[in-house]
Image (cartoon, helix red, strand yellow):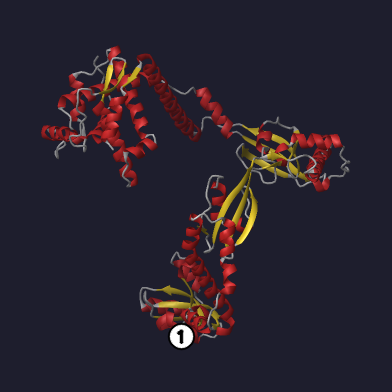
Amino acid sequence: MATGKTSRTFGWILMGLVMVGLVGFGSTNFGGSVRSIATVGDTEVDANRYLRELQAEMNAFQAETGERLTMEMARGIGLDQRVLARVIGTAALEDETAQLGISVGDVQLRDRIVDIPAFQGVDGKFDREGYKFALEQSGLTAAEFERSLRDEVSRQILQAAVATGVATQPSYVETLYAYAREARDFTWASMGVDRLSTPVPEPTEAELTAYYEAHPQDFTLPETKVITYAWLDPEDVIPTITVSDDQIRALYEEHSSEYRFPERRMVERLVFASLEDAQSAADAIAAGETTFEDLVAARDLELSDIDLGDLSKEQLGAAGDAIFALEEPGITGPHDSDLGPALFRMNAILAARETSFEDAREELHGELAADAARRQIGDMVAELDDQMAGGATIEEIAESHDMRTGVLNWTAGDSDGIAAYKTFREAAQAVTEDDFPEITLLEDGGVFALRLDELQAPRLQDQTEVADAVREGWTAQKRLELLAEEASGLIPSLEGGESLSSLGLTEVVEQGLTRDAFVEGTPPAFMDEVFAMEPDTWQVLQGEAGVVLVRLDAVQPVDQDSDEATALKTAFATGVAQEIALDVETAFARAVQERAGIVLNRPVIDAVNAQLQ
C-alpha cells in the first residue's frame, strides 16, 4: 500500500537513529545456521538486529558515563531485557503491518534514503559512494538496509494510524483550568488557646482509653537497634599529648598574619579616564557642586562596586601615604592606581591589632594537641583492624586501646552523643545482625566500631507506660474542641453585623488567592476548606495551636478567554493528547504482541549475550 508524503524531518530523525545504531560496529555479525532470537507471529527477529541494538545501548551508556559497560553489568541493570523487549515490540508491529498489507513503495523509499544527511555529500546531494561506505561500515548490504527502512516506515504508518485523532476534550481542559486558576476573597482571624474561657474538665478513664486507642501512632516506639559501640575521640587522647613551647612558638610565627594586623583603612575608589577628569571631579566636590555619591551614580555604579574593603598602607600603593594621612573620613586624590587616576574615599580607620604569643598560646596548644591526637588515632587503625579481623570483640579492643564503650538504643533520627556524627548514623542505619564490627573513621579524626545486639520491631506501648502522654494529648485535643465551640458561638454575632475586629480579634482580609496559596498562621488544609465554602458563610477550622474563623466573601471566576488562558490551555491540551496517544500506542503494541504470540529462542539469545562478554 503506497503511503502519502510523510514528514521528511521525521524520516531524518528516524534514519539518524538507525545509523547511530548501525554505523561504527564494523563487521560484527552473529553467524551460524540459527539466526533468529524469537518469532513474533510470522515474523522472525534476526539475531544480528538484537546484537546491534544491544551494542548501541552499551556504547551509549559508555559515552554518557565514561565507564565501560560489561555484559554482566548490563544484565545487572536490566539493559539486555529492555533491549529484548523493545526489539520484540518492534517485530510485533512489523508483523501486524505485514498482516494488514501495509507497505511503502519504491519511490517513497528512494525519497527517504536520498534525504538522509548521512548519505549526502558536501554539496548536499545524495552520494552513492558514501551510501555504500556507510552500509559497509555497519555490516549491512543495501538490500538489508532498505528492507529495514521499508519495515520501519510501514510501522510508522501503523503507529500514526493508531494515535492520530487523539484529542483532549475542551470541557476537560476548561474544568481543570478553572480548578487551578479560580480565586477566592475571604476574611479570617485566628483564636489561640489563650482565649479559651471554658475550663477543661478532668478526663474519665474511658475518655483517656478512647484517645489512646484513636492515636496509636503517637504511642508507638519506632524500630530500635540496640547497638554496642567502642569509640575513640581525639578529645580523649589530647590529655595524653605533650606539646613543647618550641612547637607552639613555631606555629605562632607560621600564622603570624592571623595574630598581627597592621593599621588599615576602609576605602572606596572611583577611577577616571584621565588625570584631568579626576582633578575636575575633585574640584567639583571641593566646591560643593557635586558629591562623591553623585559621581558614582552618574557612572551607573553602586557604592558596593567601588568598595575596596579594609586595606593596609602597602596595599593601597601610591595612594597609601595620602589616605593614611587623613585623620578622619574624607576624600583624597586624584592618585595613581592600577586602573588609572582615581579619587579615594576613606570611610573608617581600623587601628593596628596584635594578639600576643601568651594570649594565643592556649589556642595554639589545643590545635597542636588535637592534630597530634588525630595522627595518633590514625596510626592505630591498622592495628585495630588486624585485631578485629583476628576475632577480637568490641569490648576487647576498647580495653586494650582505652576506648569508650556504650550501649545505644538507636532509632532513625537520633543525634545525641556519638550519633551526632553522620558517619555513625549511616553505619547504624545499615548494620544488620549478620555484620561483623569494623573500624570506621569519623569526621573529626576519631574512630569507632559498632555491633547490632538486638533489633526491636516497632511496638505500641501499653497505656500505663504512656499515661502522662495520653493525658496531655487528650487535654490538648479537648482544649481545641472547647475553643472551637466558643468560636462557633461568635458566628451569630458576626452574621448579625459584628466584625472580627469588634469582637477583639485581629481581622485579615485576603483577596484573589488561588487554591495553592499559602496563608501563614492557618491550618494545613485551610485553602481546601475555603474553596469548599459557599459565599457569605462562616466556618471554624481547627488547627494544632488554635482555631480560625473564616468567611468566604466572594468567588472570583477565571477568565477562560484571555490570551494567557488560551495559550496555557492549548499547551496543556496538546501535552495531554500526546500522553494519551502514547498510552494508546503502548496498549495497541501489547495487544498486538499477545495476539501474534511470542516464541523466544533462549539459546540464541544467550549466545548473542556471550559474544558481548
Depth check: give the residue in front, 311 or 334: 311
Depth check: give the residue in front, 352 or 180: 352
Q: Which residue is drawn at 43% across and 24% down?
A: 583
The single residue placed furthest to the top in the displayed view is 100
Residue 296 drawn at (x, y percent) = 47, 69
Q: Quadrant of the N terminus?
A: top left
Depth check: give the residue in front, 141 or 321: 141
Residue denoted by label 1: 322
Horizontal arrangement in the rendering, residue 23 relative to residue 256 (left or right): left
Location of residue 446 by image quarter: bottom right
Amino acid type of the residue that numbered disc 1 sits on in the rendered structure:
Ala
Horizontal arrangement in the rendering, residue 110 relative to residue 544 (left or right): left
Asked if residue 137 can be seen in this view, the reply is yes
Location of residue 212 by image quarter: top right
Depth check: give the residue in front, 445 or 115: 445
Residue 497 drawn at (x, y percent) = 81, 37
Q: Quadrant of the C terminus?
A: top left
Rendered position, 198 above or below 39: below
Q: Residue at x 37, y 76 (%)?
A: 338
Horizontal arrangement in the rendering, residue 166 relative to residue 34 (left or right): right
Residue 424 drawn at (x, y percent) = 56, 54
